Image: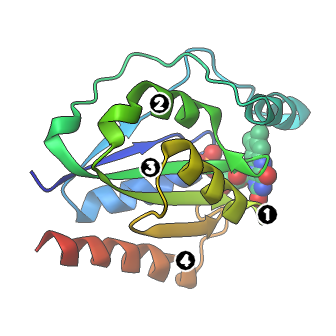
Amino acid sequence: MNKIAVIYYSMSGNVEYVVKKIEKELDVDLMPIIPKKDYPKKGFKKFFWGGKSSVMKETPTLEEYHFDASQYDEIIIGTPVWASSFAPPIRTFIKENKEKLKEKKISVIICYSGGGAKKAIEKLKEYIGIKEFQKELILIDPKEKETTEKKKDINHFIQTFKRSIK
Ligand SMILES: Cc1cc2nc3c(=O)[nH]c(=O)nc-3n(C[C@H](O)[C@H](O)[C@H](O)COP(=O)(O)O)c2cc1C
């Protein structure tokens, strides 16, 4: 075991940018979560429909995925902040896998534009039913606003896994 599953949703590539960096450095399985019906990705509609879906705590139907929890003892969940919460596709995944997530060490990657990350983390913990995440990586739009500082944070996050794997 000792394998890590990275379960993530990314609409515009920021979360994906981080998980791809992780994939280069660690033995992880990436598991993108994809809603069957895509959200609008541009303009006002993007924020309106996604925001509404998040506020209404929707659980959109997901494209088929295969998650063999027995292969992993560590899970990383990656999500953007939507309306000060986590993205609805992640809500669906957790709902469908709550039992499987128990007993796992769970860490989180949160990408946002400047507000609501802490709230999103609290809501995510509550929804999963855990008190704390093992590790948290919180970044402001790392793909669009790449900085040395953010690269360092990502690298540090990766290193802590390398240490815990040894
Ligand atoms: C529907 C929607 C709601 C959002 N709500 C917030 C928010 O409440 N706070 C915030 O800081 N950013 C918010 N954002 C911005 C994203 O969290 C941010 O751009 C993130 O880096 C996107 O990750 P992604 O590219 O992996 O999808 C929102 C974006 C969308 C599409």
Q: CA distance from mark 2 to mark 4?
A: 27 Å
Between discs 3 and 4, the one toward the N terminus: 3
Which circle, 4 or 1, is nearer the viewer? 1
- Left or right of 66? Residue 60 is right
- Left or right of 15? Residue 43 is right
Q: CA distance from mark 4 to mark 1?
A: 17 Å
Residue at position x 27%, y 60% from top?
Answer: 24
Does residue 8 sit above or below 105 in this rendering?
above
Q: Amino acid at mark 4?
A: Lys
Q: Secondary structure at mark 4?
A: helix
Residue with the mark numbered 1: 115
Does residue 158 sit above or below 98 in this rendering?
below
Residue with the mark numbered 2: 93
Image coordinates for residue 21, horizontal then vertical, percent? 37, 61
Q: Amino acid at mark 3?
A: Ile
Q: CA distance from mark 2 to mark 3?
A: 10 Å
Residue with the mark numbered 3: 77
Q: Amino acid at mark 1?
A: Gly
Between discs 2 and 1, the one toward the N terminus: 2
Between discs 2 and 3, the one toward the N terminus: 3
Image coordinates for residue 9, horizontal then vertical, percent? 52, 40
Q: Residues within 10 Å of mark 4 (few under 14, many from 20)?
A: some
The quadrant holding residue 30 is top left
Between discs 2 and 4, the one toward the N terminus: 2
Circle number at residue 150: 4
In the rendered image, the quadrant that contains the C terminus is bottom left
Residue at position x 35%, y 22% from top?
Answer: 65
Q: CA distance from mark 3 to mark 4?
A: 18 Å
Residue at position x 13%, y 56% from top?
Answer: 2
Q: Secondary structure at mark 1?
A: loop
The residue closer to the viewer here, 147 or 52, is: 52
The quadrant holding residue 88 is top right
